[in-house]
Image (cartoon, coloured by chain):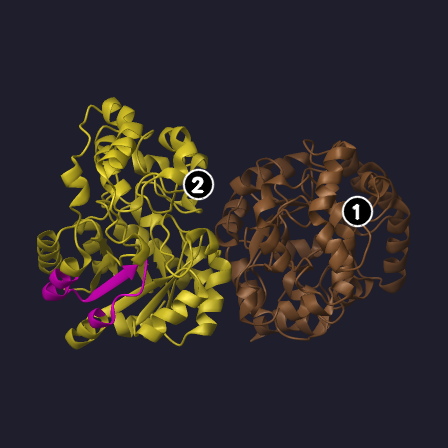
Chain colours: A brown, B yellow
Amino acid sequence: MKAGRLGQLLGIDYPVIQGPFGGGLSSVSLTVAVSEGGGLGSYGAHHLRPGAITKLVAELKASTTRPFAVNLWVPLGREEEPRLNDVELGRHIERIRPYYNALSIDAPSAEDVRSQPCFDEQVDALMAAGPPAVSFVMGIPPHRVIRRAKRLGIAVIGTATTVDEAIALENAGVNVIVASGSDAGGHRGSFLKPVRESLVGTFSLVPQVADAVALPIVAAGGIVDSRGVTAALALGADAVQIGTGFLATRESGASVIHKKALVGSQARTTVLTRLFSGRTARGIPNRFVREMAAHEEDVPPYPIQNALMQPIRRAAAEQGRGDYVNLWAGQAAALTPVGLGAGEYLASLVEARRR
Amino acid sequence: MKAGRLGQLLGIDYPVIQGPFGGGLSSVSLTVAVSEGGGLGSYGAHHLRPGAITKLVAELKASTTRPFAVNLWVPLGREEEPRLNDVELGRHIERIRPYYNALSIDAPSAEDVRSQPCFDEQVDALMAAGPPAVSFVMGIPPHRVIRRAKRLGIAVIGTATTVDEAIALENAGVNVIVASGSDAGGHRGSFLKPVRESLVGTFSLVPQVADAVALPIVAAGGIVDSRGVTAALALGADAVQIGTGFLATRESGASVIHKKALVGSQARTTVLTRLFSGRTARGIPNRFVREMAAHEEDVPPYPIQNALMQPIRRAAAEQGRGDYVNLWAGQAAALTPVGLGAGEYLASLVEARRR
């Protein structure tokens, strides 16, 4: 199995990109293992401050000479710097206070909630650090960012959830487009229309994007085993991006309780929810999602809800409380093999193609 | 390209089943063209009275010696024989009266609305007529029906939208399972859980169903061209079922305005709506869907809403009013080739595999 034109562009041996999960689910050892195995390891850095991004890229460069990608979230115009007065913020905190209490942690301060990493500063740090590739979700990276990346020889990967988004990304000048179908786990990156109007299945999205743009296409969403890799390439993709499958590997930063949840028949059911971050993401429903379901529409936007929930997500993962943690998973999660190393898993995806 | 174990079971040359669209969108000439071309033609008969089913099967048998399937909808327990008093019925009629008026037609009488075909009588007529295969959506066909079909040598095809539904159908004794992903156009056949909790993309659903059951599997939803056929087989399907693509062929019973809507970029956007029938179905949004969107949750259940809308659907199709007609379409509709005959289209799906 060869990686074709995308392999040449990115310098990878196999047409497999590891999904760039953020919020601490990525790990340097996973990124490195995938890149050393001949795929493109990724690291989701949207939650990191500029200094941490600088350190991250240095650590990755010191750990592998192979290409890797670092991912950021483009701010959505309509959500940018949401202002919430103290009364409103207090109301949202009171609603989830029972969960802070259940985990014996404090609610974040208003200052913590309001001081989130700034995209422009993140991008500056990232470009200065100079990773081999950068990937973006949630929007079109600004023109100045794409221009700077090109000058520096950094490949720019954009993410589309609809054909129109793919065309917009191609017009903006990115080098590679990930076509992320509604089967995918984690956050939906829709940016031209609301998420609920942008849920196109991977099977339908990939060939339409392949027909609509000239750039190399990466299929994402529901790809877990070698059957999925073969099918995605047949649909017109140049490569695949796999999130859930790599999340379950030994090297990932996911908690033990998260990895356990990805195995077996309960992983067949996933839901889309804004409850964990203020943006819509797909995961396995648990007690928190069920108890809070009535408030789904009244959750403050990202990054407010994300900041409010961060201590809960972290503490629940540490304490092994699967009932309160964000169990991101794609719709084919139940196909995930148990307990593999990332290199071994990557090999299982591409070896079968040699038969 | 061979049809494998499913080909032997159904007696077809190619692993392609034409989706059994009901409500007048099927046509004898389409069913016959697909079956004569080496696939399995289907006819959706859920809207027909027993006498019409008897005539239909006789006509199909007289037109082809090849196998074909006739499809019925299994009644959902919770909706069966819904009772609506005259006041409620009147309220629902008044809401859509502007559309009756716009099309210069009368609202149906309360008697018409309440006298819908009875499933048990439909099945009796169908079994007595003895088609080569019967297919079902919306539920598990009753045990007595499966037993009778087996005694008569009629193949029974069930339709699942989740892994659990596939397992339930296998346990009930059907011969073939269609795994219908959320990419699919037309009515969603979910029966164990509500439709909104059963939206699994084709890419994710097919390999999980293939792993969960021993029966031959047919992939449905988002398959329009030969890339889709190749991908579906790679994911573990024994065959594909294609709705939208055949709906666009010359022989189908779809209106000119419907076939026209399937071509081009406006077909990239589809929505799920209960407005046309009282059951959730996927189609291209038009003026009727937009104007009535606020009433989506207050639509009476099938078959009441279906009966109320039947004159509107029919008149709008006849009068070429795309703004009022039910434009059923899957999420890959925009890939549909224009104006092909069904045999030519079927050949395009399987010929490419010979390269």
Q: Which residue is mark 2?
A: B270
Q: Nearer the viewer, residue B19 or B51?
A: B51
Q: Nearer the viewer, mark 1 or mark 2?
A: 2
Q: Is residue B5 above or below residue B112?
A: below
Q: Is residue A77 visible?
A: yes
Q: Amino acid at mark 2?
A: Thr
Pinpoint residue B353: horizontal percent, then vertical percent: 41, 62
Q: Is residue B89 above or below residue A241?
A: above
Pinpoint residue A100: horizontal percent, then vertical percent: 76, 54
Question: Which residue is pictured at 64% across the width and 65% down the height?
Answer: A245
Question: Which residue is pictured at 51% across the width and 47% down the height?
Answer: A200
Q: Chain letter of disc 1?
A: A
Q: Is residue A23 visible?
A: no
Task: Give the position of the N terminus of chain B as an image quadrant.
Answer: bottom left
Tell me the magenta residue range: B123-145
Q: Which residue is mark 1?
A: A154
Q: Chain letter of disc 2?
A: B
Question: Which residue is pictured at 21% across the width and 34% down the height?
Answer: B311
Q: Amino acid at mark 1?
A: Ile
Rendering quarter of residue B110:
top left
